[in-house]
Image (cartoon, rainbow, N blue to C red):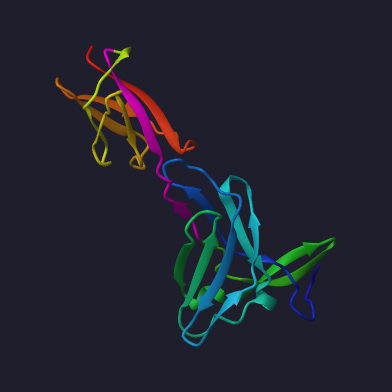
Amino acid sequence: MTVFAPSPLSVRQVLVRGKVSEAVTARVFGDFAAKLSFTTATGQGVLPATLLIKPGGHYALQLDPSRDLPDLSKGGPVTLKLEVAIPGRTLLVQSKVIPAAKFALAVKPVKIGTQTLNSRVLSGAPFVFDFKLPAKPVGLRGIVLKKHDPDAPLAGVKIRAGTAPQVLTAANGRFAINALPVTETVSIQLEGTGPIETVVFRPDYDLPVNTITLSLGS
């Protein structure tokens, strides 16, 4: 039996969903805040959506469309703007222009106990907002040895790590690069007095400063 409630049944619906992750590292985030707002040709406002953070960086913003949402189904398109604030990171902002028709209310049966009641939901929701942050650069500290001999550090070796500025090894063979290119692997070139040699290095983005021991000569 379907029962038509005298007023719209209060049902919370996922209005926006998505994933917050980091490029290159695939790291996900489980601690952030979100603010959802809208703009139309006739007005704007902030929507009282509740944030639910799920495992794996997934999230959902939900509200009761029949009570918490103004009628956005008439007139021109609606711009939804989502702001995501992650501690220690730059504020993430993403906007989407959505046809007004997707904000029309539709009837959806909901079973409660032995009864089926009619609720009202947005016909076009949920809307997907995925965020992919750039990974933070990490530094590199290292030493260049002659033929893997720890007692024979090489001075004056030119070190090029991808697109990072070139550095030279000091008298003790050591060098430092403040920020490596943010990629899965970095090609490190060593140029001493002989042929240029190349080493492929995979940065560990969980460490703010990586370390490496390099060698020139066979």
Question: Residue 125 location, x and y as percent?
Answer: 57, 66
Left or right, 213 with respect to 126, comes to left
Give the farthest residue toward the left.
194
Can you say whether 166 is above or below 123 in the image?
Answer: above
Whether residue 149 is visible here, answered yes or no, is no
Q: Position of residue 134 (x, y in %)?
A: 42, 50
For the record, the magenta segment spans: 129-147
Q: Quadrant of the N terminus?
A: bottom right
Q: Residue at x 56, y 49 (%)?
A: 29
Q: On the rendered image, what quadrant is the C terminus found in?
A: top left
**In the image, 217: left or right of 39?**
left
Decide which of 2, 79 is in the foreground and name it. 79
- Judge whether residue 140 is colored magenta: yes
Closest to the observer, 6 or 164 = 164
Q: Is 167 drawn above or below residue 126 in the view shown?
A: above
Would you identify the image quadrant in which residue 171 lies?
Answer: top left
